[in-house]
Image (spheres, helix red, strand yellow):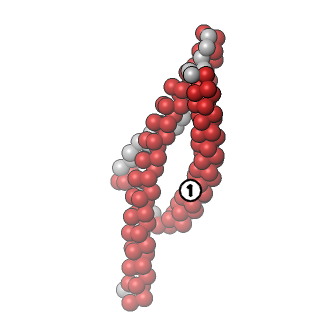
Amino acid sequence: MTASTGGQTKRVEDAFAEFNESWMVYWEAYVELQNQLYESVKAAREVSWLAATDTAKVAEINQAQRQLFASIPRRVDYAPLGQVTQNLDNALRRLNELQAALTAEKASCKRIEAAIDLLLDKASRTKQELQAVS
């Protein structure tokens, strides 16, 4: 092995090590966000039940929420790394797939930020209305 090949190999190893560290940072943030989103969904769902003024409204809200909850992705199952093919020939393709997925995720995060702002606004308005009648 030549010195330049050894240097290139070391740079690739270092790049993968840095990637793994950043992946762990991402994963911890993802799990924390997912847990918080579940708590927020639970709290928002409980508030939405307050709008149920009659049995028809209860059935309507329940059906809408059942459909929403059916579409919620389940938590990620752990897959052992031993099942991953260590084929560096596919590395660039996999990195491109990762970048595409993260780009789509970033756009979704912006959408959820807008949805959170909307829900916060409506929660504040609802709170003001309740305080006005109390």
Which quarter of the picture shows residue 14?
bottom left
Q: 110 and 87: which one is in front?
A: 110
Residue visible at 57% across and 60% down?
A: 99
Q: Residue furthest top?
A: 55
Seen at 61% across and 44% down, the residue is: 117
Q: Is residue 108 visible?
A: no
**Closest to the observer: 27 or 109?**
109
| Image quarter of the C terminus | top right
Horizontal and vertical percent position of residue 111? 63, 47
Total numbered badges shown on the rendered structure: 1
Label 1: few (<14), some (14–19) or many (≥20) C-alpha neighbours in 10 Å: few
The residue lying at 35 percent from left, 53 percent from top is 82
The residue under label 1 is 102
Q: Position of residue 22 (x, y in %)?
A: 43, 63
Q: Amino acid at mark 1?
A: Leu
75 up-or-down from 3: above or below: above
The secondary element bearing badge 1 is classed as helix
Instruction: Kindly indicate the quadrant of the structure image that contains residue 122.
Output: top right
